[in-house]
Image (cartoon, rainbow, N blue to C red):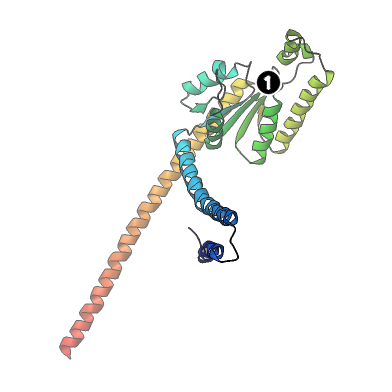
Amino acid sequence: MFSLSQYYFIDRLLTFDDLSKKSQCKNIKFKRAFEFLQLLFLQRVYGIDIITRSSIRRLSKQQQQSEFEVFLGGSCNPTTWRCEQAIPYFQTHSVSYYNPQVANWTPDLVEIEHNAKESASLLFFVIDHDTRSLAAIAEVCYLVARKRTIIVIMNSMPNDKYQTKFIQQKKNFNEKDNQADYENVCKARETLRLLLQIKNIPVFDNLKVGLECAEFLIKSRKQTINNYKNFDEEKNCKHNEKSKTTHLFNKFYRLSIFLEKKSHATLG
C-alpha cells in the first residue's frame, strides 16, 4: 500500500507526540490539538485509500450490471423521438439502450446516467429544432474531443423562428422575445456541424437513417468481437499444442541424456 519512505514518514510523524510530553509543551490545549491533527492525518491517509478502493469496486460492478450498447442522448422534453422511434427500433433489432429521459427525475440518476454513457459502445444524439439543445451541443463537442463513437442527427432550423417550440413557449409564458436567442441557437448548430465535418463524424438529418446506421455499427462491432474471440481461442489452442509438444520433446531429451550417462557408467 505504501512505500518504505512513506512508512518512515508516518512513523516520524507519530513520534512527534513525544514532544507534547516534554516540559516545554505544558499547554493542554496545544497537546489535544496536536493529537487531533495526528488523528486527522491517519484518517486522511488510510480513509481515502479505503474509500477509493470501495468506490472503484462499486463503480465497476455498476458498469458491469448496466452495460448498454447505445446511449440515447440529445434533446429531451418536450421531444418524443426516443419513445416513438428510437426505442421501438432498437427493441425490434435486439440492441440494448439507455434512455435518460424519465418522467420523474431524481439526483441519484446523475451517476446512473454517467455510468451508462461511459459504458455504451455508441452514443446516439438527436438535436432537433423544438428545443435549444445548447447543453446537448456542448456535450457532443466534449465527447468528440474524447474520441467517443458518436452518431448525430441534427435537422435544419426553420426559416420562421415561430415554428420552433421553444419560441412558441415564450408566448405561452408571456416571456419577452429576444432576437439574439434564435440566432444564437442557429450559430451553435452551425459551429457543431463544422466541428463534426472536420472530425469526419456522420451527421444525419433523418432519424430513421441514423437508426439504421447505429444498428449497422453495433452489429459490425459484435461480429468483430466474435471473430477476434474465435481467432484468439484458435491461437491459444495452437499455442497450447505447441507447448505440449515442446514439453514432451524436452522430457524425451532429458530421458535420452540420462540413459546415455547410465550406459557409460555401466560400461566403465
The residue at which mark 1 appears reads as: 128
Residue 191 drawn at (x, y percent): 76, 31
Q: Quadrant of the C terminus?
A: bottom left
With respect to residue 209, does 31 lie above or below? below
Task: Tally the numbered discs.
Answer: 1
Residue at horizontal 22%, vertical 81%? Answer: 260
SS of the residue under disc 1: loop
Which residue occupies the foreground of this view, 152 or 182?
182
With respect to residue 207, does 3 lie above or below? below
Picture quadrant of residue 121: top right
Residue 168 drawn at (x, y percent): 74, 11
Residue 145 drawn at (x, y percent): 67, 40
Q: Farthest residue to the bottom: give it.
A: 268
Which residue occupies the foreground of this view, 21 or 118?
21
With respect to residue 160, does 210 lie above or below? below
With respect to residue 57, does 136 lie above or below? above
Which residue occupies the foreground of this view, 234 or 149?
149
Residue at horizontal 35%, vertical 60%? Answer: 242
Give the amino acid type for the residue marked by disc 1 in the picture. Asp
Residue at horizontal 60%, vertical 16%? Answer: 80
For this view, does 101 lie left or right of residue 131?
left
